[in-house]
Amino acid sequence: MRVTVSRKAHFNAAHRLYRKDWENDKNDAVFGKCNNPNFHGHNYELVASVTGEIDPETGFVIDMKVLKDIIKNEVEDAFDHKNLNVEVPEFKTLNPTAENIAVVIYNKMKVKLDPKLDLEITLYETPRNFVSYSGK
């Protein structure tokens, strides 16, 4: 029997959406206000969902403390109150869109989980705008 458990977390971060190889007019046309050269910020909400078999000894899919610690170490410590473009190595050459942030979070967390567990990341950039990624 496969069950999904989820944990919510949040972090605050600034970013700028743009491509260095594009002229400013094209960046403005594609990214609009998000191309602000002085950056802008979001209060990101994260839902990390782990799916797997229930361990017959513990009754857990994953110990929620373990999941909490992975989120803290791999996401909150790495992204909270940071300028993603400037301070987070993964975004030195990768545009920090919500889609790319979700994929980076997935990749950072997935390697810390037992390989037989599935992971899905849902990242809310605003209460109405969110993305999900499950490695597929």
Image (cartoon, rainbow, N blue to C red):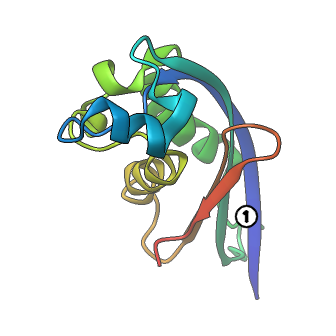
**Image location (x, y in percent) of residue 128:** 81, 46
**Image location (x, y in percent) of residue 69:** 55, 36
**Looking at the rendering, which quadrant does residue 66 occupy?**
top right
Query: As drawn, which residue projects farthest toward the front?
Result: 25
Q: What's the amino acid at mark 1?
A: Phe
Quarter of the figure that contains the N terminus: bottom right
- Residue 80 visible in the shown view: no
Residue 35 as seen in the image, left or right of residue 20: right
- Above or below 104: residue 118: below
- Above or below 121: residue 95: above
Which residue is labeled 1 in the image? Answer: 60
**Image location (x, y in percent) of residue 97:** 47, 44
Packing grade of label 1 (10 A; few <14, some 14-19, many >=20) is some
Identify the residue shown where x is 43% and y is 51%.
100
Residue 24 as seen in the image, left or right of residue 44: left
Residue 73 or residue 84, whichever sits in front: 84
Label 1: state its secondary structure: loop
Identify the residue shown where x is 39% and y is 16%.
37
**Image location (x, y in percent) of residue 116:** 49, 77
Identify the residue shown where x is 43% and y is 11%.
38
